[in-house]
Amino acid sequence: MEFNIEFYETSSGRCPVREFLDELKEFNPDDFAAVLAGLAKLRNREYHRPPLSKPIGDDLFELRHVAKLNTRVLYFFMKGQRIILVHGLRKKTRALPARERQVALERKRDWLARNPT
């Protein structure tokens, strides 16, 4: 059984990860293709471990693509084989900035509050 990949939406209807991926596709198609391939592996249950995917605490995970700029898509799992994408970022360093992790955690909390299981 495959996982369903869903995008977090704000209460106003914005989809930050989709916006991030659209921008990535426009400015760096190779990295975009690598991230999509990584998402396909997650969806197909092929690879839910390092180096592709890594837990970052509070039941959050990061999909990792290492290149000149490191690309990350942060997500969490839900019952029913669901993966919820909450945040995307690019950075020069390997370490995940605490600020970016906090953004993902706030979006996770918002999603859970608006989508009771």
Image (cartoon, grey):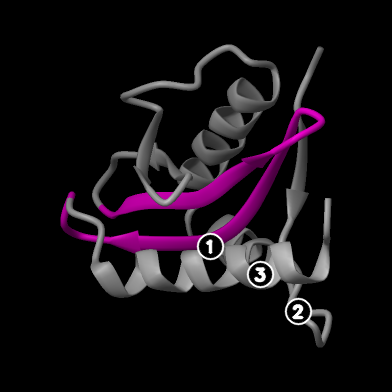
Please tell me which residue lies in front, 65 or 59.
Answer: 59
**Residue 26 at what x, y percent from top left?**
59, 62
Which residue bears the numbered disc 2? 14
Residue 83, above or below 51: below
Please rate how many residues cluster around mark 3, counting C-alpha atoms within 10 Å: few if below 14, some from 14 to 19, many from 20.
few
Residue 19, above or below 42: below
Please tell me which residue lies in front, 14 or 32.
Answer: 14
Q: What are the residue bounds of the magenta stretch?
A: 69-94
In three-dimensional space, the C-alpha distance between marks 2 and 1, rounded to whole angstroms, equals 12 Å
**In the rendered structure, are the residues bearing label 2 and label 1 in contact, judged by CB atoms less than 8 Å apart?**
no
Disc 2, SS: loop
Q: Residue at x 50, y 60 (%)?
A: 88
Q: Amino acid at mark 2?
A: Arg
Residue 37, above or below 78: above
Please rate how many residues cluster around mark 1, counting C-alpha atoms within 10 Å: few if below 14, some from 14 to 19, many from 20.
many
Disc 3, SS: helix
Nearer to us of marks 1 and 3 is 1
Which residue bears the numbered disc 1? 87
Main SS of the magenta segment? strand
Which one is earlier in the sequence, the residue at label 2 or at label 1?
2
Q: Residue at x 67, y 73 (%)?
A: 110
Identify the image quadrant of residue 92: bottom left
Q: Residue at x 66, y 69 (%)?
A: 19
Please tell me which residue lies in front, 76 or 89.
Answer: 76
Please tell me which residue lies in front, 29 or 43.
Answer: 43
Q: Quadrant of the N terminus?
A: top right
